[in-house]
Image (cartoon, rainbow, N blue to C red):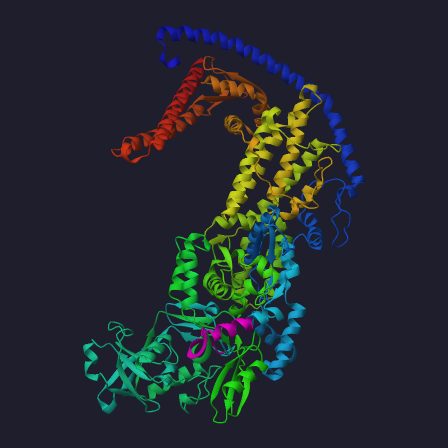
Amino acid sequence: MDSLELTREELEKKKKKDEKAREKELKKLKAKQKAEAAKLQAQQSTTSSKSEKKKNAKREAEEDNLEDYTDPETPFGEKKNLSRQMAKTYNPSAVENSWYEWWEKSNFFEADAKSTKPPFVIVLPPPNVTGALHIGHALTAAIQDTIIRWKRMSGYNTLWVPGMDHAGIATQVVVEKKLWREMKLTRQDVGREGFIAEVWKWKNEYGGTILKQLRRLGASLDWSRECFTMDEKRSKAVTEAFVRLHKEGLIYRDIRLVNWDCVLRTAISDIEVEPIELSERTPIRVPGYEKPIEFGVLTLFAYPLEGGLGEIVVATTRVETVLGDTAVAVHPDDPRYSHVHGKFVVHPFNGRKLPIICDPLLVRMNVGTGAVKITPAHDPNDFKVGKRHNLEFINIFTDDGKINKKGGPEFAGLPRYEARVAVTEALKEKGLYRGDEDYKMSISICSRSKDVVEPLIKPQWYVNCKSMAQQGLDAVMDDTNPKMEIIPKQYVAEWQRWLENIHDWCISRQLWWGHQVPAWYAMFEDDKKKWVVARNEEDAQKEANRIFAGKKFELFQDPDVLDTWFSSGLFPLSVLGWPDNTEHLRAFYPTSVLETGHDILFFWVARMVMLGMKLGGDIPFRKVYLHPMIRDAHGKKMSKSDGNVIDPLEVINGITLENLHKRLEEGNFNPTELKTAKEGQKKDFPKGIPECGADALRFALVSYTAQSDKINLDIQRVVGYRQWCNKLWNAIRFAMTKLGDDYTPPAEIVPAGMPFSCKWILSVLNKAISKTVQSLDSCEFSDAATAVYSWWQFQLCDVFIEVIKPYFSGNDPSLASARRYAQDTLWLCLDYGLRLLHPFMPFITEELWQRLPSKKDSLRKQSIVISEYPSTVECWTDDGVESEMEMIESVVKSLRSLRSQLAPNERHERRAAFVRCRKSDACEIIKMHELEIATLATLSSLNVLSERDDAPLGCKVDVVNEALSVFLTQKGNIDVEAELEKLRKKMEDIQLQCDSLKKKMSAPSYQEKVPPYIRELDDTKLASLMQELLSFEVASQQLGRQSSQS
């Protein structure tokens, strides 16, 4: 019966009885504590000198045998020689040394096209040949290697293909700078053939650095299949794709507007264009000009109407383009200009008559003057107007950004921004200038050259993408039978938007480095050109002779090269041998997963899908996982000028602040930028970056992937995982001391007769395995990493390893069986746990796994790399055991919380504790597990009290739940008021939860709208909260009585 329900007389009797029992119990407790204290003091006095001698002897022995703790030298490519004893602390550089070379030499990463195992294929997004490893590459490598190692261990014939992209523009720029720096020569000075030879020379000497760096990250790529987008096989694929698509009419030549770079003298793709938003006039440095050029200015000037009938005022941010104007547009409904429809204005510099046209699509009456100058050859919107109205297209710029002859003799030869000033002055002289004003606008900058992009009309090669885009769209959007999945799903809408609104793809570039367009033009005597497309010059000559039979002509190959994205778009096909029907193509196409950044969903992913389906007959991959973009810890985009760029190798190896600054000084910064960058580094890395190792960096990056589209990378988190590696290291060191040199794991482990803690750790291991595999399968990599981490940290290290220590504290024969079970379970957990963790942290898991003893008469795999990935074992799952451990951990948590409230000098002493149970089943569970609770909570003793027992005096108290309260003894008097205040706060919190739940359950629509199982859960939760509230009330009353008695 509840004590609150007793009559007053009964309460008085019970109170007297309880007081007597309490006095008796206190006498016993004090006597027991006194005896224990005396015993402990005696033990300490007799053993302190012995333990000190032992420590000194051990220290001296270690100093004498340092070589026992140091790995012997390992010949390159041989299996690592491990030290006889494990080092005391984890050292990433020592652990990560030698393993990769052995893995690679042992061919662990190579796929076999003849294998009967199911294939699993990933193609590494080919990094630029000019590039060095950056944090984005590290993220890609960490995720992909996690996937490929998991699949390799899960019995798949895994292929991860490495490759490099020839990076047309980037590579050409690098080599041109090198030529000028070393020989003061331009590419035109050495000629095309000589320049290409220089590029190959540079590529062979310096290119591919990034692939070597990927090895340092542990990326288990099949290096036997390493390829380059400009090698012979890939070049053959590019040529074949162009010829086939041209034959089907999908590749054609046309004159259109392109993004033109006047420094590089080539068309560039949209991805190489970076917009800069301006809110007012702003000076910006442009290559080739000594002084900054002013942008964000709107210039107004007047066009005289033909016949002296007045003028029309127009406005422009690029006044130099007036030289290429071919019309003025107005809105057909604008009454201000109705009288000039069909009339002409006169060009101020060349006298040309420009028609006044009506265009409701372009002109907005309420913007500016309502009249717009039209330059079809130099503006995307004007280009469309020119097509609609059949206007003349006049290109006024040379390829290097100077005014050409069509711009008029007054301005010809002037660089475009000098022409801007000259045209403005000329308008003023003619009395046509009407002023200027600040203007909010965007300008486009080439990411490679930093030049301002100029829209130019040029003849180029294009791919008609419409039909291929529809196939790519259907592959994802088909509700009944989707062929391809995009993860995260938020990017499906972007996929749809891109492909539904696709434009034809300009694939030619005016560079020398790249795949030269496999097209030849026949030049006839009348200077007319006709084009033929062929696989080589011999075929082109035959085709031209057939088409132009009887005519005299010379044949020349198009000097242009193809867009780098064209060869990259063929990569999943070309790396497997296409266009030849190779064994590898049949075995490994389509590939399994594409993992890349969401920023190139269209530029690369969509184009691979279009070309793969068109030329390969199937989608190139079944699943696309798009990882987030990495920012710094403050969410700011990484920029060299801000000093917040993180080099993965500097995180792996560590670097001082001084050397971080030194790297900046070697860059191309002006003094202001250098100062800003150094200040940024000093703020973020005041002591530099400590050595973290590849494993910690990889684990941190994979853990971050839950952050949707952006990762705010804090190096301290990487440092935290490096410290966690030390925890793993120590767990194995502990295990090795408890297993002993002669330990041999059993052939089979059956939980039936095991101690409680062993059953529990196997049950939660089962859940960790299930959660990890499930998360990996659904590309929830952060969840997978969390599942592994949580098991290792919070269940194996924090609980199991601690709770089994009493089994090894002596040679008690009664614990022999439990000790053996604990050894076997510990070994099994380490074996399973290391294999579970391996895809995330390959180096430390290999090193530690190699140190584990092997089963007797069993052939263990050479390496953890090719061992079996853990799978669940049905007989390990035990929900009852887990439920009991949950109760134990709740009790321990409350006791630890009470301990933390003690005075600092008392917190580390073992203390007596009590658990008071309000339910008999809870009482039985706690009694069964007194040892586990006492061990985990560091208690000197634990007494289990029933509801009928009086609460002990002189204790701090906490309510665990509705069934349990805990008491921890402390020295001196209890501050009852402080303890009561803590209880009151907790009661207020529970009361709020009760009130909130009652409000929800009393809502008019609750019974109709809330499912029965939810209503049942709410009922249970409310009952539990009410019971817990009652427990707090009882605890408060007990403290109140204690206060009155004192």
Q: At x 49% / y 47%, what residue is drawn?
A: 778
The image quadrant that residue 383 belongs to is: bottom left
Is residue 86 found left or right of 262 in the rendered image?
right
Question: Where 621 sits versus 339, above or below?
Answer: above
Question: Where 25 sits versus 362, above or below?
Answer: above
Residue 296 visible in rendering: yes
Q: How many marks?
A: 0
Residue 719 position in % (x across, y down)? 59, 47
The image quadrant that residue 59 belongs to is: top right
Question: Where 818 sits versus 675, above or below?
Answer: above
Looking at this view, name the residue that lies furthest to the right: 64
Residue 932 position in % (x across, y down)? 58, 24
Is residue 490 found left or right of 733 in the rendered image?
left
Quadrant of the snapshot with the N terminus = top left
Is residue 490 found left or right of 542 in the rendered image?
left
The image quadrant that residue 166 belongs to is: bottom right
Residue 455 position in % (x across, y down)? 42, 77
Q: Is residue 930 magenta?
A: no
Q: Which segment did they paint magenta? A: 238-262
Q: Which one is nearer the viewer's eye here, 610 or 487?
A: 610
Q: Which one is nearer the viewer's eye here, 427 or 353?
A: 353
Q: Which one is nearer the viewer's eye here, 177 or 125?
A: 125
Residue 212 position in % (x across, y down)? 65, 60
Question: Where 243 sits versus 355, above or below?
Answer: above
Residue 909 visible in rendering: no
